[in-house]
Image (spheres, rainbow, N blue to C red):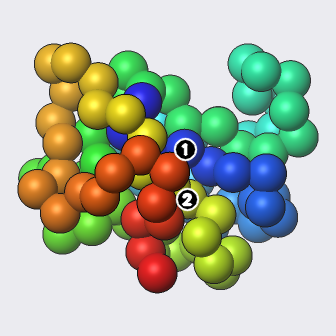
């Protein structure tokens, strides 16, 4: 997965509106059953080729909600990424 949305998510939809590849789904479509938004790893491109940083994290009003996860083989990875578990935007 490229980025993850943590359980501090307030379900505001800001990230969904900003994702250029529609990799984020709301709590109703979250395959884990959790009541937070979910990022599909096989779709997330970390906004490489679209924005300097992941647009979802820039739009998110909840500090630290969107964090880096492991890099997915074959998917783009931001050159600015930090280690898994660190917030994308601080």
Disc ID at residue 4: 1
| Residue drawn at (25%, 57%) of the image | 81
Depth check: 17 or 6 in front? 6
Image: 9 above or below 33: below
Answer with mark 1 or mark 2, whichever residue precedes in sequence: 1
Q: In this view of the protein, can residue 51 be seen by the observer?
A: no
Q: Is residue 67 left or right of residue 77?
A: right
What quarter of the picture does the N terminus occupy? Answer: top left
Q: Is residue 43 left or right of residue 8?
A: left
Determine the image quadrant of residue 28: top right
Q: Secondary structure at mark 1?
A: strand
| Residue drawn at (11%, 56%) of the image | 79
Q: Secondary structure at mark 2?
A: strand
| Residue drawn at (75%, 28%) of the image | 30
Image: 73 above or below 45: above
> Where residue 55 sits in the image (x, y, percent)?
38, 65
> Where residue 45 sits in the image (x, y, percent)?
27, 40
Is there a contact, CB below 8 Å, between mark 1 and mark 2?
Answer: yes
> Where residue 67 sits in the image (x, y, percent)?
50, 55
Q: Is residue 31 left or right of residue 65?
A: right
Image: 66 above or below 76: below
Q: In this view of the protein, can residue 28 be seen by the observer?
A: yes
Task: For marks 1 and 2, give the CA distance.
Answer: 6 Å
Disc ID at residue 66: 2
Q: Residues within 10 Å of mark 1 (few under 14, many from 20)?
A: many
| Residue drawn at (64%, 37%) of the image | 38
Determine the image quadrant of residue 65: bottom right
Q: Residues within 10 Å of mark 2 (few under 14, many from 20)?
A: many
């Amino acid at each position: 997965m490229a980025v993850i949305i943590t359980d501090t998510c307030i379900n505001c939809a800001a990230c969904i509106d900003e994702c250029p590849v529609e990799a984020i789904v709301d709590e109703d479509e979250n395959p884990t059953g959790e009541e937070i938004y979910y990022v599909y790893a096989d779709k997330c491109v970390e906004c490489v080729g679209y924005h300097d940083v992941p647009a979802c994290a820039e739009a998110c009003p909840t500090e630290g909600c969107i964090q880096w996860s492991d890099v997915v083989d074959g998917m783009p990875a931001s050159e600015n990424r930090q280690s898994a578990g660190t917030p994308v935007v601080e």
